[in-house]
Image: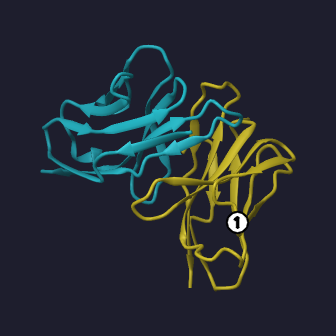
Amino acid sequence: AQSVTQLDSHVSVSEGTPVLLRCNYSSSYSPSLFWYVQHPNKGLQLLLKYTSAATLVKGINGFEAEFKKSETSFHLTKPSAHMSDAAEYFCVVRGNNAGNMLTFGGGTRLMVKP
Amino acid sequence: DGGITQSPKYLFRKEGQNVTLSCEQNLNHDAMYWYRQDPGQGLRLIYYSQIVNDFQKGDIAEGYSVSREKKESFPLTVTSAQKNPTAFYLCATKGDRAYNEQFFGPGTRLTVL
C-alpha cells in the first residue's frame, strides 16, 4: 500500500520569496514520485519526477524537489516565487504494481501576493 | 495538455440522465485513465485501460462505465446510478515504459442540475 500526505492545504508567499510545499509519502518499496501543477479549470502538468536516479530533481519553471528516504519526504521548493506560480500543486506516488497506479496527495494551493 | 482532447469542457445534465464524456489522444499511448476530482481534493481513479478491448475498475468505479474499442479513444459514461456525479473529470494517458509519467487532458466539468 502507498499513501501521500501534503502537509499544508494552503501556502501563501510574497512574490520574490522562497516557496516550500511539503510532501511525505509511505510506500513498501522504492517509489517513483511526482509533482504536478494545476491551474484553475485546467488539466495537470508535470513539474518534475523522481525515479531512483539523482535525489535532487530539477523541474520546469525553476522548481526542484529533494527525495529524502530517511524522512520519507519529497518537498517541492523554488527560490523565488512569481505571480504565475499561483496554482494547486499535487504530490503523487506511483505504485510498482500492474498498471502503475498513481496515488495523489490532497493538494496544496499556493497563493502569491504582490 | 499535449495530445489529449476532452470534450466538452463544460457539461450540464439533468438528474437521472446518463452522459458520456469524450477522451481522445494522438500520443500512441496504450494506457489510458479516468480520474474524478472534487473541490479541495486530490484525484481518484475511476477506470483504467492498459490496452485496447481491456479495462479495469479503479477505486471509485460504481456508477460509471467505459469502453476501449480504439487505442485513441476511452469514453466515460456517467450513469444515473452515480449518486453524486458533479465533479471535474480528467483523462490521462501513459507511455509504454514503466518509468513514464502520466499526461493529463484539460478536463471536463460536469454539473448535475
Q: Quadrant of the N terminus of chain A?
A: top right
Residue furthest to the top:
A54
Question: Disc 1 marks which residue?
Answer: B62
At which x and y percent is residue A11? Answer: 22, 49
Residue A49 location, x and y as percent? 46, 28
Q: Is residue A32 left or right of residue B31?
A: left
Q: At which x and y percent is residue A82?
A: 21, 41
| Direction from residue B9 to residue A85 in the image, left or right | left
Q: Chain letter of disc 1?
A: B
Q: Which chain is cyan?
A: A
Q: Residue A4 at x, y = what percent?
A: 44, 42
What residue do we see at 65% from left, 41% from top?
B93
* Left or right placement of residue B80 versus residue A63 in this view: right
What is the three-letter code of the residue carrying label 1? Glu
Apparent side of residue B60 relative to residue A44 in the rendered image (left or right): right
Query: Dot 1, how many residues are within 10 Å of its Cα: few (below 14), some (14-19), or many (20+)?
Result: some
Residue at image coords 60%, 73%: B85
B27 vs B19, nearest the viewer = B19
Residue B63 in the image: above or below residue A97:
below
Residue in front for this viewpoint, A36 or B4: A36
Q: Which chain is yellow?
A: B
Tell me what residue is drawn at x 52 percent, y 53 percent: B43
Question: How many callouts does the rendering have?
Answer: 1
Q: Quadrant of residue B36?
A: bottom right
